[in-house]
Amino acid sequence: MCKYMLPSDNPSQNPESLKSLSDKRNQKHPHIIFEARTKANKGCANSGILEWRMPRPRKPSHGSGLVETADPNGAGRYRRDVREATKYIETALIIDKAMFEKRNGSTRAEVVHDAIQVANIADLYFRTLNTRVSVVYIETWQQSNKAQIDGGKDISKAISNFNDYTSRNLFKIDKDTTQLLT
């Protein structure tokens, strides 16, 4: 079982938090969690031009939460500032037979609940990037795998088989990514 410690500041600035963690050597996997912050100047890395970061007149969008700025080169056109907009990753989850076998005696609902919890954890990580993970589709392979996936053998073949299955069978599902939970 992992023990988490949440220091109040960045661990590099708070050595006491690291010291208190070193006292827990008998724990199997101690972790430190902190919010990563940077004071780096944000700008275009390719050009060295930073004036695009200067405030421009803003026009609120049509209730979508996006901020639009006037484009100086466009005639009456506006650009959306995607840095301030919340982005969404629409995810399809496929739960294979091995996931059910590892949870011997668990119901389908319990295994699906665990898979959704995995997506929720991913969502927590992406929130710091102003991005949300949204599960739009779940498929379970409780009886048998619909794509040949053998984790003990060639992983590239398993990924290729899974990709073939998703491109043939899930093309109608509007999604950004498909994840196999095994």
Image (cartoon, helix red, strand yellow):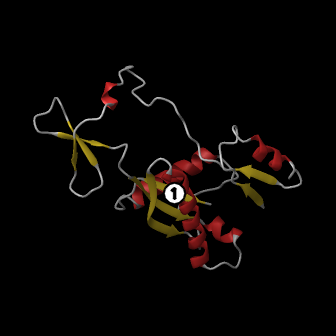
Quadrant of residue 111 within the rendered picture: bottom right
Q: Residue at x 43, y 24 (%)?
A: 45
Give percent across and percent down for residue 61.
22, 51
Say which residue appears at 39% left-offset and 57% top-offset: 175
| Residue 153 x/y as whole percent | 68, 49
Q: Residue at x 52, y 48 (%)?
A: 160
Q: Nearer the viewer, residue 10 or 48?
A: 10
Quarter of the image containing the C terminus?
bottom right
| Percent coordinates x, y for residue 110 in the rendering | 61, 76
Residue furthest to the top in view is 48
SS label for mark 1: helix
Q: Is residue 141 above or below residue 89?
A: below
* Residue 74 falls in image quadrant: top left
- Residue found at x 58% / y 66%: 117
Which residue position holds label 1?
Answer: 123
Taking the view exactly as shown, the residue that stands out farthest to the right is: 26
**Amino acid under disc 1:** Asp
Q: Position of residue 171 (x, y in %)?
A: 36, 58
Residue 50's place in the image compared with 69, above or below, is above
Q: Quadrant of residue 14?
A: top right
Q: For this rendering, which residue is in front, 105 or 16?
A: 16
> Taking 71 as reference, is 34 left or right?
right
Observer-nearest of 14 and 95: 14
